[in-house]
């Protein structure tokens, strides 16, 4: 169940420039690369040990969601984040694979 506090933009309104702006930050790019495995990840896991404060990670998660790259699902007290890979692949073919492998750099 998605939270009303975490709206996801309709994929048809997601602009490539907004996606690229979001992943221009090295931490957000690393988040996308982590999520590229196709699995939802808990927002409070050790895989997010990027050496920044929790509030900074929250900002990065929000930026990715608002750019249309991710979706957050809330189940009870657990928040999971996942890449909108299939939708993004349809909208921008090959982009996620390029970001995930570092070929976009």
Image: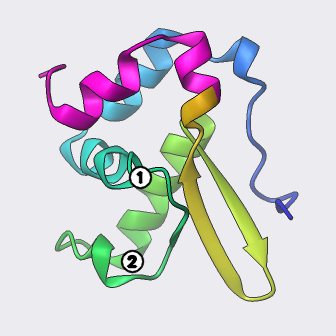
Q: In terms of depth relative to the viewer, which is nearer, 33 or 21?
A: 33
Image depth: mark 2 or mark 1 in front: 1
The secondary element bearing badge 1 is classed as helix
Which numbered disc covers residue 7? none
- Residue 24 in view here: no
Q: Residues within 10 Å of mark 2 (few under 14, many from 20)?
A: some
| 11 to 48, vertically: above or below | above
Q: Residue at 78% of width from left, 25% of height from top?
A: 10
Per the rendered image, the range of residues in magenta is 87-105
How are the colours assigned in the image? rainbow
Magenta highlight on residue 74: no
| Dot 1 crowding, Cα within 10 Å, few <14, some 14–19, many 20+ | some
Q: Main secondary structure of the magenta part?
A: helix
* 36 or 53: nearer the viewer: 36
Placement of 90 over or under 82, stated as above or below = above
Residue 30 relative to residue 11: left or right? left
Image x and y of residue 94, in percent: 38, 15
Q: Which residue is mark 1?
A: 35
Which quarter of the rendering shows the C terminus? Answer: top left
The percent position of residue 20, horizontal first and vertical second, equals: 37, 20
How far across and down, in percent of the image, does residue 66 sit?
Answer: 61, 38
Of the two numbered discs 2 and 1 on the same chain, state the one appearing first in sequence. 1
Determine whether label 2 and label 1 are within 8 Å by CB.
no
Q: Do we see residue 29 in this rendering?
A: yes
Residue at the image point whose x is 65% and y is 75% from the top: 79
Quarter where residue 76 is shown:
bottom right
x, y (%) of residue 25? Answer: 25, 39
Frontmost residue, 31 versus 26? 31
Q: Secondary structure at mark 2?
A: helix
Q: Please tell me the numbered disc located at residue 54.
A: 2
Question: Which residue is pictured at 79% across the width and 79% down the height?
Answer: 75
Q: Is residue 34 left or right of residue 52?
A: right
């Amino acid at each position: 169940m998605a939270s009303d506090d975490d709206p996801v933009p309709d994929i048809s309104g997601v602009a490539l420039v907004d996606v690229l702006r979001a992943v221009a930050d090295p931490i957000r790019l690393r988040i996308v690369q982590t999520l590229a495995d196709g699995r939802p990840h808990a927002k409070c896991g050790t895989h997010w040990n990027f050496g920044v404060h929790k509030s900074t990670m929250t900002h990065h998660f929000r930026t990715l969601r608002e750019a249309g790259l991710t979706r957050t699902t809330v189940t009870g007290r657990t928040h999971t984040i996942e890449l909108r890979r299939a939708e993004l692949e349809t909208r921008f073919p090959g982009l996620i694979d390029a970001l995930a492998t570092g070929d976009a750099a």
